[in-house]
Amino acid sequence: MINPAANSTKEMAPGTRHDTLDDLFGYHNWQKTVGLGESLRRKYFLAVVESRRHRVLHEEYSETIGNDITSQWTQMVVEWGADKTKPNPYISANNCAAACISYSTFEEERQEEQLSLTDRAETMVGFLTNALVLEESQHHITQEASGKDLTPLQASQLQECRLNLTKQIKRLRISQRMYMLVVETLIANTAPQCGQHGVEQVKLWLPSALDTRVRQAGCIQGLAVKEELLREAQCYDALKSIRLNQRAKRHVIIHKKKSAPGQRNGTRARSSFDRLDSKINQAVQKYRAAHTALRRLRANSEWCASLPTLRDQDICPPPAFDIDNSGSVRSMKEAATRLGEGHRELSWIWRTATISGDGEDALLNEGLRIEWVKSRARYLRWSEEVLLCKEEMRRVRQALQSRIDNWTDKVMVGSDVTDDTTRQGLSAYAQSQIGVFRSLHTRFTTLWETPPGRRSQLPALTPPAEDDSTIDESLMSELLRGAAEAGEVEGDDEEGSGSGGRARRG
């Protein structure tokens, strides 16, 4: 609203322009004050609905895991909240291969830079790391754009990703010219790309994409060796992501078969499958791209024993997850007589040395733990939003009541004026302001205490008493109690659906 007023006020005199802008600011603030009723009402009812929905989802998820394990995960969250040096429960606790190798290569390069007189804007490992990130972005855009009908919003977001990727590739070329002298010739000899829509097919021209002769002649010494280490780290990191998402996917299948029948839960499970499949496909593309680059960089094939070619049939859950031993006797008999069960072979992705646990130990299933603590965090945040909305409503009513009392005092002060006309004018203006703020107080209270409708099954707000001076302390204590305060909020909301708890009106 203020930006369009720039053309209207730029030719005004300074005093007139100041008064005009002051009027516009005052009008904007007044509109915001008047709209607090509807705004807070929408936020409160949305918070109640989302809090209940996430509570049900979190409780269902917790029941499938068990109280013993969830108690340990909750303790991890509490300990990490008190001391950030503790293991972070929201990320993988195992040592990441990519992080370890990147750290070692950065340390080696730092020592080399201290002994060298060359001053470069970006380190060799930093350049390669940025290039690998851009390569993953290209794979992600290719996956999003292929085989699906995009909505106008999705198409615009995809186009924005392409534009950002184009800018990042241009910045990458600046550092690439310092480490790869042959890159200018390669780009010039390459056929022109098909504009922004072909940015995901643009060749980045890393050392792994060059022939051995061109790589040795056109790259800085040591660049290919460092890419080897980063590519190997990519392979192990991708395998870890595949294993975690396969375990989480199998757990969703077991949960759906046991306790979530019906079309509604099936649709919800289908959306979970789609998200996990998307993550698995991205990890598969990452592994295959890194594996192909590693084969071009390394002459010997001894490393293929620990990092073989990833086939489609290798991407499967382990047998420990494929057969549910806690199922019925009939299902176990059917599994035992299934054709080919005696010749089943465990996929090599579950036999690598970097795996901790065999898949049956739920304590080591990091994928399930991460999803559970995130579900808990979403539930607690929406429960906290319910409390904050109620407190904000209380403060708005208290502020309006303070305005009413302030104008009432001004009416009493105006009685000391000797001039009858002036006294009557001051009194009339004060009474009008009292009426405005009292009407807002009444309207907001009625609006917040009235449920939106029967079908929504939402509770009305039960406002606290106006004379409760400990509301701030009680609110903070409720927020700090963690999961316990969420249940209290829900119970309080359900009790508030009646007609009790009317606030005192000025």
Image (spheres, helix red, strand yellow):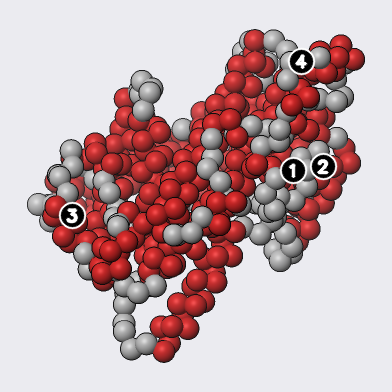
Q: Residue beneath label 4, please?
A: 338
The amino acid on which the numbered mark 3 sits, given as a three-letter code, is: Ile
Check whether the beta carbons of the residues at disc 1 and disc 3 lie within 8 A of each other: no
Query: Quarter of the image containing the N terminus?
Result: top left
The amino acid on which the numbered mark 4 sits, given as a three-letter code, is: Arg
Q: Nearer the viewer, mark 3 or mark 2?
A: 3
Q: Nearer the viewer, mark 4 or mark 3?
A: 4
Tell whether 244 sits left or right of 468. Answer: left
Label at residue 365: 1
Local crowd at mark 1 within 10 Å, few (<14), some, or many (≥20)? some
The amino acid on which the numbered mark 2 sits, given as a three-letter code, is: Asp
Check whether the beta carbons of the residues at disc 3 and disc 2 lie within 8 A of each other: no
Quarter assignment of residue 377: top right
Local crowd at mark 3 within 10 Å, few (<14), some, or many (≥20)? some
Task: Please provide percent x and percent y for residue 296.
Answer: 40, 54
Q: Residue beneath label 2, please?
A: 361
Q: Nearer the viewer, mark 4 or mark 2?
A: 4
Residue at the (78%, 43%) spot, across then down: 358
The image shows residue 463, relative to residue 374, as above or below, that is above
The image shows residue 115, relative to residue 492, as above or below, that is below
Check whether the beta carbons of the residues at disc 1 and disc 2 lie within 8 A of each other: yes
The amino acid on which the numbered mark 1 sits, given as a three-letter code, is: Asn
Compare marks 4 and 1 and give the one earlier in the sequence.
4
Instruction: Name, please, the residue furthest toward the left.
Output: 11
Helix, strand or loop at mark 4? loop
Label at residue 80: none
Compare marks 4 and 2 and give the one earlier in the sequence.
4
